C-alpha cells in the first residue's frame, strides 16, 4: 500500500505538490562546456514531471564552487536561459521544479574553474580532503584557503543572486545545498570548521554562515520558495565529531523559527545510525524540528509510505530509482515492477 504517497501536500499557502514523491537532486555531469543545461537535460527532467516536486541536480552559484565536470551553473545569462528551457518544459508537463544551489567549498578543484581567473579553493578553514577526485585520479584535492569575513559576505550575496537567477529562470523555488560535506556543511562540522572568529568554535558561530545564506535567500525570493538540505550525520566528504550535535541542535532550533518550504535530509541510506545523533539522521531531525521534513536514502516506495504513515517524515525523495525509471511515479501508482538502478546508467541521460 502506497496510497498516502499520492495525496497532494501543501508546502505552504503558495505551493501545493500533486503528490508526496520528490525527485532527489542527482548530479549528472551533462551540462555543456559553458555549464549551460542542454535540450537533453530538459527532456530528462520533463520525463519525470509527474513527481510532486523535482529538485534539480546541484547547480553552481559561481565558478569557484565547481568540483566535478560539466555540472550546470546559474551565474551567467546563457545558463539562466538554458534553465528556462528546462523549467518551461517541466511546467508544460504539469510538474514543479526547484533548483538546488551549490558551492562545493573544499571539494572544488581549480582544474574546472581556472579559466574564470580564480585558482583558489575556498573553505571555512585550511583543512583539505585526502585523496583525489572521483574518476579523475590525476587531480588531488587542494588545501583550501580559509575565507575572510569579506569573502563570506560576498558568498552570501552570491547565493542570494543565484536564487534570484533561479526565479528568473522559471524555477518554482530553490533548495539550498547544505548537505554532503560541501561548503555550507563545512561550516557546520568541526572536522572542516576550525575558525576562531565569529564563524567558528561555538554552535551559534558555526551556524552563522548557513543561517545568513538561508535568510538572504528568503529575503530575496521568499521563505515559501526556499528549502534546505542538511546532513547532521557526517558520511561523505566529512568526518563526524560528537561536538557537531550541538551545532545542529542550535541550527535546527533557529530554523524552527523560520518558515522554510521544507527541510530535506542529505543521506544515501537512512538506515545509517550516528552515535552522536542517537539514531538515524531523519529520526534526529524529526525529534528537534516539527515542520515539513523530506526523508530520503535507500527507500522503496513501500518503505517510504510506511515511514510517512508512522510520521517519521512528510515527503519522500527518491534518487537512484528515478534514474532507472523516468516513469517512477506511474509505476508505483500502477504497482508495476521497477527497473533496478545500476551505476552504468550514469553514462547517459534517459
Ligand atoms: C546524488 N545525490 C545528490 N545529493 C545532492 O544533494 N545533490 C546532488 O547533486 C546529488 N547528486 C547525486 C548523484 C548521484 C548519481 C547519486 C546516486 C546521488 C544524493 C541523492 O540526492 C540521494 O540523497 C541519494 O541518492 C539517496 O537516495 P536514493 O538514491 O537511495 O533514493
Ligand atoms: C562524477 C559524478 C559526481 C557526482 C557527485 C554526486 C555523488 C555521486 C554519488 C555516487 C554514489 C556513491 C555513493 C557514496 C555514498 C557514501 C556513503 C558512505
Image (tube, rainbow, N blue to C red):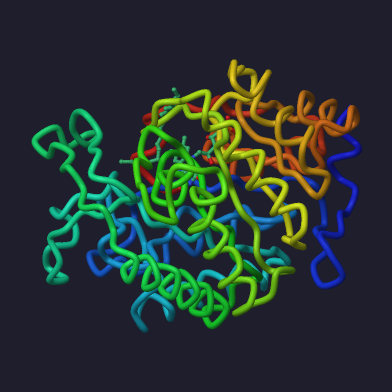
Q: Position of residue 295 (x, y in %)?
A: 70, 37
User: Residue at 48% of width from left, 61% of height from top?
Assistant: 101
Where is residue 49 drawn, in percent x and y? Answer: 66, 58
| Count of numbered circles on the image | 0
- Residue 37: in sight, yes or no? no
Q: Quadrant of residue 266?
A: top right
The answer to whether 178 is drawn above or below residue 5 in the figure is: below
Quarter of the image where one finds residue 176: bottom right
Q: Quadrant of residue 331?
A: top right
Q: Residue furthest left?
A: 138
Q: Give the residue displayed 74% in from the left and 60% down from the top.
A: 261
On the rendered structure, is 218 left or right of 44? right
Q: Is residue 182 left or right of residue 259?
A: left
Task: Give the residue displayed 58% in from the left and 58% down from the top.
Answer: 175
Quadrant in which the N terminus appears: top right
In this rendering, the answer to whether 295 lies above or below 17 is above
Q: Tell which quarter ligand 2 is in.
A: top left
In the rendering, at what x and y percent does residue 258 appear?
74, 61
Where does the image place residue 211, in percent across and percent down from the top left?
A: 57, 59
Viewer-closest of 81 and 161: 161
198 left or right, relative to 107: right
- Do we see residue 308 in this rendering? yes
| Drawn side of residue 40 relative to residue 319, left or right | left
Amino acid at each position: 500500500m502506497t496510497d498516502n504517497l499520492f495525496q497532494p501536500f501543501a508546502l505552504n499557502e503558495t505551493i501545493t505538490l500533486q503528490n508526496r514523491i520528490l525527485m532527489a537532486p542527482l548530479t549528472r555531469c551533462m551540462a555543456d562546456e559553458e555549464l549551460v543545461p542542454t535540450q537533453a537535460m530538459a527532456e530528462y527532467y520533463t520525463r519525470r514531471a509527474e513527481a510532486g516536486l523535482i529538485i534539480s541536480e546541484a547547480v553552481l552559484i559561481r565558478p569557484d564552487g565547481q568540483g566535478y565536470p560539466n555540472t550546470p551553473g546559474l551565474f551567467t545569462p546563457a545558463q539562466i536561459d538554458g534553465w528556462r528551457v528546462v523549467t518551461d518544459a517541466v511546467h508544460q508537463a504539469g510538474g514543479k521544479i526547484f533548483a538546488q544551489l551549490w558551492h562545493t567549498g573544499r571539494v572544488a578543484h581549480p582544474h574546472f574553474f581556472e579559466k574564470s581567473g580564480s585558482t583558489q579553493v575556498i573553505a571555512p578553514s585550511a583543512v583539505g580532503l585526502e585523496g583525489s577526485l572521483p574518476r579523475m585520479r590525476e587531480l588531488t584535492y587542494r588545501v583550501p584557503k580559509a575565507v575572510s569575513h569579506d569573502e563570506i559576505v560576498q558568498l552570501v550575496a552570491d547565493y542570494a543572486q543565484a536564487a534570484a537567477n533561479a526565479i528568473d529562470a522559471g524555477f518554482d523555488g530553490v533548495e539550498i545545498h547544505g548537505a554532503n560535506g560541501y561548503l555550507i556543511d563545512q561550516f557546520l562540522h568541526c572536522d572542516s570548521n576550525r575558525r576562531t572568529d565569529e564563524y567558528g568554535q561555538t554552535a551559534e558561530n558555526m551556524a552563522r554562515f548557513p543561517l545568513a545564506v538561508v535568510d538572504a535567500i528568503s529575503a530575496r525570493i521568499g521563505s515559501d520558495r526556499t528549502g534546505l538540505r542538511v546532513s547532521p550525520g557526517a558520511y561523505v566528504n566529512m568526518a563526524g565529531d560528537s561536538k557537531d550535535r550541538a551545532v545542529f541542535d542550535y541550527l535546527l532550533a533557529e530554523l524552527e523559527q523560520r518558515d522554510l518550504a521544507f527541510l530535506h535530509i542529505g543521506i544515501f541510506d537512512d538506515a545509517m545510525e550516528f552515535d552522536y545523533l542517537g539514531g538515524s539522521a531523519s529520526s534526529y531531525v524529526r525529534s528537534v524540528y516539527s515542520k515539513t521534513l523530506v526523508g530520503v536514502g535507500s527507500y522503496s516506495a513501500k518503505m517510504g509510505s510506511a515511514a510517512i504513515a508512522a510520521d517519521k517524515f512528510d515527503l519522500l525523495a527518491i534518487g537512484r530509482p528515478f534514474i532507472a525509471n523516468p516513469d517512477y511515479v506511474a509505476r508505483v501508482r500502477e504497482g508495476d515492477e521497477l527497473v533496478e538502478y545500476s551505476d552504468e546508467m550514469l553514462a547517459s541521460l534517459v
